[in-house]
Image (cartoon, grey):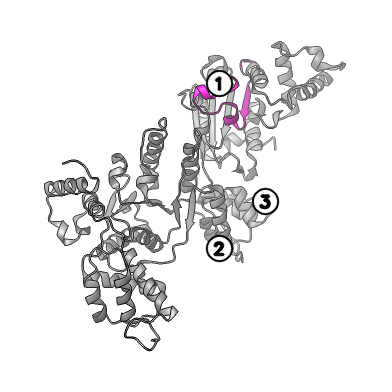
Amino acid sequence: MSTIDLPRAPDLPGWMTALRDRYLHTETGQFVLHGNINDMVLAANRVWSMTAFLDQFFAPSDKVVVHYDPGRGVWFAKPEHAARAAKVLVEAGLYTEARLQGKATSEKARAQGMAESLMREIGLERDPAVVLPQLEALLVRRDTPCAVVIHYAELIAPEGMVGNLGFGDRTAAATLHRWSMWDEVVRSDNLVMLLTSTLTTLSRRVTGNPRVGVVRVPLPGALERARYLAQIRPTLDPDRGESLTRITAGLQLRQIQDLMAMAEPVAVPAQTLSPTDARAVFKAPQSALPVEAIAERKKEILEQECAGLIEVIEADHDFSVVGGMEPIKDALMRVAGHIKAGRTAQVPMGIMLVGPMGTGKSFVAEAFASECGLPVIALKNFRGGLVGLTESNLERVLSVIEGLGEIVVIVDEADRALSAGGGDGGTDSRVIARIKEFMSDTSHRGRIVFIFMTNRPDKLDTDLKRPGRLDMKIPFFHAQTAAERLSIVRALIRRHKLPVEIADAELLPILEGLSGYASADFEALLLLAYDDFAAGHLPEGVTVAPEKLTVPFFARAVADYMPTREKDMVDYMEWLAVSEASNRRLLPDRFRSLTLDELASSLAVSRRKALKLEW
């Protein structure tokens, strides 16, 4: 193992390459590693734990490598590192030579005795107030360069309002900050690495310091997953290997190992370091892994990993069961075609579906995802009551989204989920800023498609809605004509597989009088009629139960059903949808010819009525 030169490994992970280059070419001596830090690392044809990887990475530099974990204590990469550290600590006056050397006489025995004594003295020490001064004594020595690795750094210097932190937390944060600014540390060829799974839980005094390098460890990408799968299942053929590489997107290597139920990885052949696509990694002729079962288990892992924060959605319908909305379906089918063909430049960064409740926004979003062939997750409530919890939850979700890669992310009631109230000490503004930053990342175009759904777009941050984040804004309205309403009813019949025997000529006169009914209203009507039919509750004038649902059942349901509508608010939501639409072609005929001045005037009048404002 000592012959492995990890710093020059051709397959060194990109995040470690970035850290190495910044350390070598700048005055940065302190780094924060955040994200997927508890996973295995694939490098130099081997799989390492994070701790073993860091130990081996620093081996060629001959640095003393010391680890500190507030739950485990202190340990060194090698016994000789402990011996060298013991000598420094004695010279710094933190220990006496007699205390550490014992009764040994030879140089070798004394070094071994000092190492063993030091580990007994400090090995189980967990208190930062005791450990940090000893680490500092190592960091300021120029003749004994060292690398200090602090695990669970957020437990030592947590984020929070200063007044709410204990004295120990405040002094630990100050110590870490001082190390990053101290020339004695940087110029002594020393290095400090702080590991935390979530950046926002670590003190901003540290993470916001320009002298600190912040490096994100991402979830494994496609090639990394493919190489790892080829290691643990060398019998995978290219088709199955490529399929598993795609299915395991968003998972850690540890989780993939568990899914594949393999105890020990085998060495990967040297030629697998050069392929540029996942398929080329796999060479074996056949394999019979249960891909469907693995996909289902992946869903469970992701939902457990982001417990309560996301929901993995199985899109079980496409546009064939979406009635009406032809302009909307045409526009979204065009986007789906770009995604399938890999024309990423033509794929919007995000799509906003806007309109009154019950107009089919959620149903259309899932149908669109099905047409794209992409997996779907819904973003749930990620807000937490504790300081920093909201930002922490958001980072977990964004990390999973980025790891999944090709995905549709649905944000329902986006006006509530992403509103900027401003009364929470700045949390809302930081959340919105982080989401805007993520949605503006052009490397996500064509891979991550956000779909926001809202009936109150006026409550969303204006900058969040601009092109480059939400490029396409699609308005939804209640069906405008009886023919459109008929299309919706027929689609609902197909969706629910209802036994219906009603001709279009019988339905159209009834639907003519249902102006303003939403798609959800028609669904409720149909299910009410079917419930009566299934229960044998015959309408007046019908004496023999028919084999299928007939028009008298539907007509009675229409007479019985009472739609709940706040007309002024629904009208306002429609005008909001018109004002947000990105293309006139998506608007009903009655709105298409409006001038911007006419639109602004109508919107203002509707707003006053809906919100009961003074004239």
The answer to whether residue 163 is magenta is yes
Q: Amino acid at mark 3?
A: Pro
- Tag 3–tag 1 contact (CB < 8 Å): no
Query: Depth-wise, is mark 3 or mark 1 nearer the camera?
Result: 1
Residue 112 can be seen in this image = yes
Judging by the rendered image, the residue that carries numbered circle 2 is 240
Residue 530, quarter of picture: bottom left
**For the residues marked 2 and 1, what is the alpha-carbon distance in whole angstroms?**
52 Å
Q: Which contiguous range is marked in magenta?
A: 140-169
Residue 314, percent across and down? 47, 61
Residue 189 can be seen in this image = no
With respect to residue 179, does 215 lie above or below? below
Residue 194, percent across and down? 57, 29
Judging by the rendered image, the residue that carries numbered circle 3 is 265
Q: Secondary structure at mark 3?
A: loop
Q: Amino acid at mark 2?
A: Arg
**Rendered image: mark on residue 170:** 1
**For the residues marked 2 and 3, what is the alpha-carbon distance in whole angstroms?**
19 Å
Residue 522, quarter of picture: bottom left
Please state, as top left, top right, bottom left or bottom right, where the N terminus lies in the image.
top right
